[in-house]
C-alpha cells in the first residue's frame, strides 16, 4: 500500500526543516514541501533544494508575488486596512494566500493532509487553519510545532540526531521574524520588554533616522481607481512599484512601528514592524480619497475599513463579509485617480500635495481670497435651520427651569435635569 502524502508549507527555517522528518516518522507518510515566494527574500531555489536533501519526496517552489499583490495587497490598500491604527497587516495578508496554495498543491498531489510551522500561541495558526477548513474541509491539518512542544535547543538536538543539515538554517537567532514584500514583523527576545526601545539590529528594511539623508526625498505616487500605477511619473506594475518604493522609503527610515497589539488568541503582545513602502502607499491612498470622496461616504468608509482590518487580522479572509466589503470598497475607488506627492524625511512621511480629475476640492468655493464663489449669505439660513432643534430645546429647558424667565447660565443647558 502506498503511503499517505502530507503537503508541508516550508520556509527553509529550523522548524519546518525538522518538521519534514518529524512528519515522516510520526505519520509514516511522504512529505511534499511547498516554498511560497511572497517576497520574503533569501535564497529561494537553494531552500527548495534543501527540503529534498532533508527528505521531502518532492519540493515545490511557487512564485506568488504577483498574486499576493493583485489579490491581497491591493484590496487591503483600497480598504486602508490597518489593525489597531498601527499594523499594516503584512503577515496577516500572506497567510490566506499560502493556505490557498497549499490546498491547490494538495489536490494536485492527492495529499490527505497539509502541515504548517505555526506554534500554538499566535494568530497565524488561526489564519491558516480557518482558511484551510473553508477551502477544503477534508484535508487533515497538522501543525507539528503546536504538537511537539520542542524548545529551540531541543529542535536543534532533533536536527543533529536526524542528520538534518543545519548550515544556513541556524543563524544567531535573536528575533522571530516573518517577512514578505508588504513588510516585516519582528517579535521576541529583547523586544518582549514593553519599556525597551527596539535596538537597531531588529531592523533590516529601514535605516536609522540618524543615518537617513539630511535633506528630504519627495516621491509622487500616481493612482488609477485606487491602484498605485506610477512612481515619480513612471508607469509601473504595482509589484515593481512596491519594490522600488521599499528602498526609497526605507532609506529615509519610514515605516517603523512599535506597538502593543491585541492578539486574536487573547493576549497582548509587543510587536515591531517595518513596512516602508506600505506606509507611504497607505498615506498617499488616504490622501487621494480625502480629495475625491464626499464627506458622508468618506466617514462611513472608515467604519468599513476598521471592520476590514479586523477580519484580515482575525483570519477571516475567505468570507462572504470580506467579499461584500470589497464590493462596497470597489465603488468608492472609481474616483480614486490622480497623484499624491509625499515628503520622506528621517522617519516621517508627510503628504504635501495631491491632484485629481475627480477632485472635490473646489478652490473657488474654499478660498478666502478674491474670486470666492461661496454664498456667505446662504450660511445664515443654513445655520438657522441646522441649529433649530437645539435652539428649541434650549428655549424649552430654560422655561422649565426658570418659569420666571430669569437668565440661565450656560452650564445649566448640559444635563439640566441633573442626570
Ligand atoms: N503580530 C503579527 C500578526 O499576528 C505578526 C506575526 C508575525 N510572526 C512572526 N513569526 N514574527 O500578524
Image (cartoon, rainbow, N blue to C red):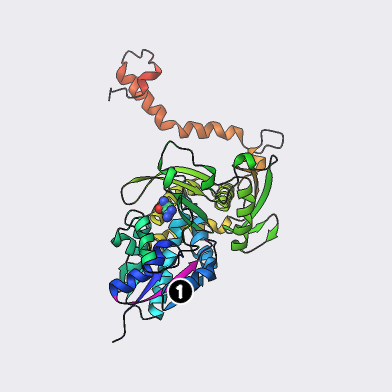
Q: Which residue is mark 1?
A: 53
* Residue 318 can be seen, yes or no: no
Please identify the quadrant where the C terminus is shown. top left
Q: Secondary structure at mark 1?
A: helix
Say few, some or many: other residues with alpha carbon within 10 Å of mark 1 (under 14 / 14 to 19 / 20 or more).
some
Nearest the eye: 339 or 243:
243
Q: Is residue 35 magenta?
A: yes
Please state the horizontal and vertical placement of residue 141, each as a whole percent of the image. Answer: 31, 68
Residue 335 shows in this picture: yes
* Residue 401 appears left or right of 48: left
Q: Residue at x 30, y 76 (%)?
A: 28
Is 309 magenta? The answer is no
Q: Is residue 302 left or right of residue 372?
A: left
Image coords of residue 181 (percent x, y) = 54, 59
Bounds of the magenta segment: 28-40
Which of the pair 217/78 is nearer the observer?
Answer: 217
Q: Quadrant of residue 269?
A: top left
Amino acid at each position: 500500500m502506498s503511503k499517505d502524502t502530507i503537503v508541508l508549507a516550508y520556509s527553509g527555517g529550523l522548524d519546518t526543516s525538522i518538521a519534514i522528518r518529524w512528519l515522516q516518522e510520526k505519520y509514516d507518510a511522504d512529505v511534499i514541501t511547498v516554498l511560497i515566494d511572497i517576497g520574503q527574500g533569501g535564497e529561494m531555489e537553494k531552500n527548495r533544494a534543501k527540503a529534498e536533501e532533508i527528505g521531502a519526496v518532492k519540493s515545490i517552489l511557487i512564485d506568488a508575488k504577483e498574486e499576493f499583490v493583485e489579490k491581497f495587497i491591493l484590496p487591503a490598500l483600497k480598504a486602508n486596512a490597518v489593525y489597531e491604527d498601527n499594523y499594516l497587516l503584512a503577515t496577516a495578508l500572506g497567510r490566506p494566500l499560502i493556505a490557498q496554495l497549499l490546498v491547490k498543491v494538495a489536490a494536485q498531489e492527492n495529499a490527505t493532509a497539509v502541515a504548517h510551522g505555526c506554534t500554538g500561541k499566535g494568530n497565524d495558526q488561526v489564519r491558516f487553519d480557518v482558511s484551510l477548513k473553508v477551502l477544503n474541509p477534508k484535508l487533515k491539518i497538522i501543525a507539528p510545532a503546536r504538537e511537539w512542544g520542542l524548545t529551540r535547543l531541543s529542535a536543534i538536538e532533533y536536527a543533529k540526531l536526524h542528520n538534518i543539515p543545519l548550515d544556513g538554517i541556524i543563524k544567531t537567532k535573536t528575533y522571530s521574524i516573518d517577512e514578505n514584500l508588504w513588510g516585516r514583523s519582528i517579535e521576541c527576545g529583547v523586544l518582549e520588554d514593553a519599556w525597551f526601545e527596539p535596538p537597531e539590529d531588529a531592523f533590516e528594511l529601514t535605516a536609522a533616522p540618524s543615518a537617513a539623508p539630511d535633506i528630504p526625498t519627495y516621491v509622487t505616487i500616481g493612482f488609477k481607481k485606487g491602484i498605485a500605477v506610477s512612481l515619480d511619473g513612471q508607469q509601473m506594475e504595482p509589484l515593481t512599484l512596491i519594490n522600488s518604493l521599499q528602498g526609497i522609503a526605507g532609506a529615509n527610515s519610514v515605516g517603523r512601528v512599535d506597538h502593543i497589539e491585541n492578539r486574536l488568541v487573547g493576549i497582548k503582545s509587543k510587536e515591531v514592524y517595518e513596512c516602508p513602502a506600505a506606509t507611504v502607499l497607505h498615506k498617499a491612498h488616504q490622501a487621494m480619497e480625502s480629495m475625491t470622496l464626499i464627506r458622508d461616504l468618506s466617514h462611513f468608509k472608515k467604519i468599513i475599513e476598521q471592520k476590514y482590518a479586523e477580519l484580515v487580522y482575525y483570519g477571516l479572509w475567505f468570507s462572504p463579509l470580506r467579499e461584500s466589503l470589497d464590493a462596497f470598497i470597489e465603488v468608492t475607488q472609481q474616483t480614486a485617480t490622480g497623484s499624491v506627492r509625499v515628503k520622506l524625511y528621517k522617519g516621517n512621511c508627510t503628504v504635501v500635495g495631491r491632484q485629481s480629475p475627480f477632485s472635490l476640492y473646489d478652490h473657488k468655493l474654499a478660498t478666502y481670497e478674491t474670486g470666492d464663489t461661496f454664498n456667505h449669505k446662504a450660511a445664515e439660513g443654513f445655520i438657522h435651520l441646522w441649529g433649530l432643534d437645539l435652539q428649541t430645546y434650549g428655549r424649552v429647558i430654560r422655561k422649565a427651569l426658570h418659569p420666571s424667565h430669569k437668565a440661565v447660565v450656560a452650564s445649566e443647558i448640559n444635563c439640566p435635569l441633573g442626570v
